[in-house]
Image (tube, grey):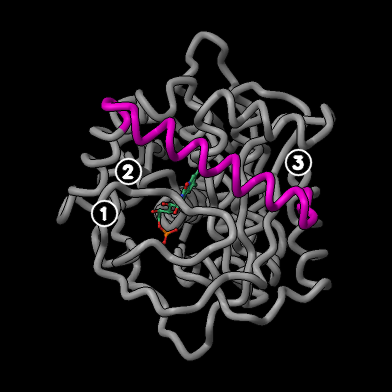
Amino acid sequence: MSQERQLTTALAEAAATAGHAPSVHNTQPWRWRVLPEALELRTVPDRRLSATDPEGRLLAISCGAALQHARVALAAEGWRAVVQRMPDPGDPELLARLTDLSRTTADPDAMRMVQCMSVRHTDRRPVSDEPVPTAAIGEITRAVTAEGCRLQILNQDQVLELAATAGRADTVEAEDQELRAELAYWTSQAGSGTGLPPEVLPDQPPQTTVPGRDFGRPGSLPVGPGHDRAAAYALLHGDEDEPDSWLRAGEALSAAWLTATRLGVSVVPLSAVVEVPATRQTLRQMLAGIGYPYIVLRLGIADPAVAGPPHTPRLPADQVVDTSAVRDELS
Ligand SMILES: Cc1cc2nc3c(=O)[nH]c(=O)nc-3n(C[C@H](O)[C@H](O)[C@H](O)COP(=O)(O)O)c2cc1C
């Protein structure tokens, strides 16, 4: 196979692999364009949560997670890429371009991460009574730092404050008709390849220290009697509150989550507290002004006696990866 053909194949495969990335309400708000010597990541405005996420913070975080997946998939196949984030100020939907691709040795760590991509999932049920080992917390934190963000593990008082803050965010969101309608839409997309099917949503509110998102309807995932007392809560944050820093936050979220998956640590993102401006401000105060909050993470060890939830569906690759510019090379 010629080097050009190898490259376009690797780009198309990396974009398809990025489909495993997590996204808010499983909106998968991204589209990839494979070019002869580059890969472009664009947002899909139709899949933006206009009521929940008017600024596009969670959209950019979701797309950042997909970007990190694609970067790792390329590294696993032995390709080095230069990443241009927000490369064109006149085209804000173009979030990133992977360019200047060159051959290198396949990275074994990246290969392991790629294996974790298809295993990683969100399990909203309580975790076991086993605390997350300190060494695992350290590795997850380092994965975040390597992506240019920070992870603050909350102390007991801060967790209680977070619990109260999450409760306030829930109340605000429950009273917002538009937001409820948006949630109802994304929890009733059966068969579309997007959204949250009932099988992944708890059949009753799980007993957690910090309330999880109220999805407005019970799912069919059985929740046992456990409580997630042993879970750790962490705040992913960084220096800026701008679209390119949200993109990086998504890359950091993805790196942290894949690292956690490799270490057997379950992650649940909690974003309602950053969606509501007043509670986002409370989180900012918890950071004592040293940064801007991007998302909260619950870290825990899943109960080994309980099978994981089913996988949340994804859009087929041909709906998210545009290969029309390289069709001849791929055929
Ligand atoms: C930016 C972002 C915000 C999220 N917010 C929440 C949340 O508040 N509550 C929740 O239960 N899951 C949340 N999730 C998890 C998604 O719902 C989940 O990733 C998506 O449905 C795909 O499922 P999977 O992670 O099992 O592949 C969030 C994910 C991302 C990337």
Q: Does residue 118 appear to the left or right of 82 in the view shown?
A: left
Can residue 112 be seen from the camera position used here? no
Disc 1, disc 2: CB below 8 Å? yes
Q: What residue is rendered at 51% in x and 71% in y?
A: 126
Magenta region: 152-179
Q: Position of residue 183 (x, y in %)?
A: 29, 40
Q: Which residue is identified by label 1?
A: 316
Q: CA distance from mark 1 to mark 3?
A: 31 Å
Q: Residues within 10 Å of mark 2 (few under 14, many from 20)?
A: many
Q: What residue is rendered at 70% in x and 66% in y?
A: 107
The kind of residue tagged 2 is Val
Q: Position of residue 259 (x, y in %)?
A: 67, 65
Q: Which residue is identified by label 3?
A: 149
Does the magenta portion include 159?
yes
Q: Does residue 4 appear to the left or right of 315 in the view shown?
A: right
Q: Residues within 10 Å of mark 3 (few under 14, many from 20)?
A: many
**Cβ at disc 2 under 8 Å from ligand 1:** no
Dominant secondary structure of the residues highlighted in magenta in the image? helix
